[in-house]
Amino acid sequence: MACFDGCATCTSSGNNSCLTCENNSLGVNYYKSLYHTICDTSCPDGQYTDDTNYPNVCVLCNYTCLTCNITNCLTCQTGFYLDVNKVNCISSCPTSYYSNLTTKKCQSCDPACISCSDNTQLSCYACQNNGTTNFYKIIGINQCASSCIINGQYAKLSTYTC
């Protein structure tokens, strides 16, 4: 029985009966996904190709990755964010970074902020010295400023708060 194009071994001649995959006569690579009996030219989300170690087989990504390659996560599953080195998906971003819900990446806060909800000084939860200037968290609003701008507040250097 002849297998469908891309199938090396199969249980029938249909395209959804492949047991193993191979490259076709035109040199097109086919891969068998982990959970299906179809050979395809790419792997589904959550799996990647590794022609050196596992030819013609899709390999499972780390569970936090939506898409990946042999070394890195490329995009993340819901609830995870691509780390600052763009290698792993993590559940929370490190200090001075925030979880961008749109891009699903850890992105830097404004240099005045230790923690924030986006990259402006108006979204800081805590402030710091950015290397040249002390910034202070203004009481009552999520803003860092180089001085306490509201009457009755003074700068407390030990906590970078007004």
Image (cartoon, helix red, strand yellow):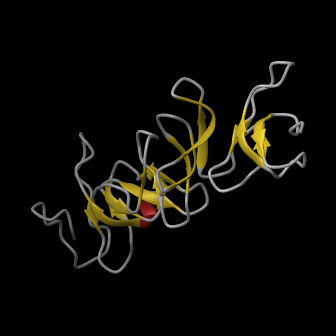
Residue 116, compared with residue 18, is above or below; it is below
In depth, the one of 94 and 96 nearer the eye is: 94
If the image is split into quadrants, where does the N terminus sit? top right
Indicate the position of residue 3 as horizontal and vertical percent values: 86, 38
Asked whether the viewer can see residue 119, the reply is no
Q: Could you tell me residue 100's position as x and y percent? A: 52, 59
- Left or right of residue 90, residue 41 in this image: right
Which residue is drawn at the image coordinates 9% and 62% (left, top)? 158
Residue at position x 28%, y 65% in the image: 126
The residue that appears at 42% across and 58% down in the rendered structure is 98
On the rendered image, what quadrant is the C terminus found in?
bottom left
Q: Nearer the viewer, residue 100 or 116?
A: 100
Q: Is residue 132 above or below residue 150?
A: above
- Residue nearest the observer in this picture, 99 or 110: 99
> How many discs appear?
0
Q: Quadrant of residue 35?
A: bottom right
Task: Name the one closer to the observer, 9 or 118.
Answer: 9
- Vertical relation: 51 (above or below) 41: above
